[in-house]
Amino acid sequence: MPPASPPCPTGPPTTAVPESVPTFSERFEGAFSGILRWHQLDALWERLHADPEGWYVYQIGEGVPDQPLPAEEFSPFLDELDSLLRREHDEDFCGIVYVDDPADPAFIKVYDPNNLGASCGSSGKRIPPRWVITRIPPEPVADDAPVPGNRRRWWQRLMGRSA
């Protein structure tokens, strides 16, 4: 006697729809938490220093990187960025760094202390961050303002490019 066959399904076959991975633009426009205090920024940098692989570093207004920054260059970059922020944002609070998830960061926006404007767009002109640190390959971000010469030189020196 042949084995019993399994019962016939009673409807169309179901297929699991894979969750879509948000694009860079979707993440860029997504929800972020502000790093309000310097000790919170220290904790964020510690997390990034502990896992330096796979981070894209993008200065808005410069070329979009097509590869993550090599791990051996990532920590020095963070140290330089931290020094610049603390030197040029001489406040007792931070408030210019935003992260998608402080406990498990994958997307960070850093605003230029010398070009803060109204980052939320309340003035009618939205100022984008100057730097993006992300695990997602970046896409170009529109910025009508040219990159100031001092930022361009700082970036080129840091990234080992000639001016």
Image: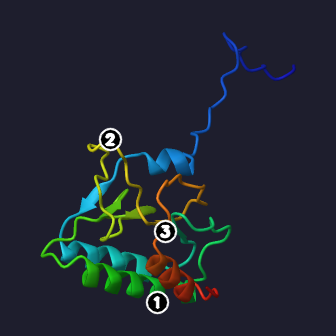
Q: Quarter of the image containing the N terminus?
A: top right
Dot 3 amino acid type = Val
Give the label on residue 124, or none. 2
The residue lying at 66 percent from left, 23 percent from top is: 14
Task: Tell me the amino acid under the disc marked 2.
Answer: Gly
- List the residue tagged with mark 3: 147
Q: Nearer the viewer, residue 25 or 149?
A: 149
Q: What colour scheme was applied to this rendering of the protein?
A: rainbow
Looking at the image, is mark 1 or mark 2 nearer the viewer?
A: 2
Query: Closer to us: mark 1 or mark 3?
Result: 3
Residue 73: horizontal and vertical position, in percent?
Answer: 55, 87
On residue 76, the disc is 1
Q: Is residue 21 left or right of residue 99?
A: right
Q: Is residue 36 left or right of residue 60?
A: left
- Residue 40: image x %, image y %? 23, 72
The residue drawn where x is 31% and y is 53% is: 119
Whether 72 is drawn above or below 99: the answer is below
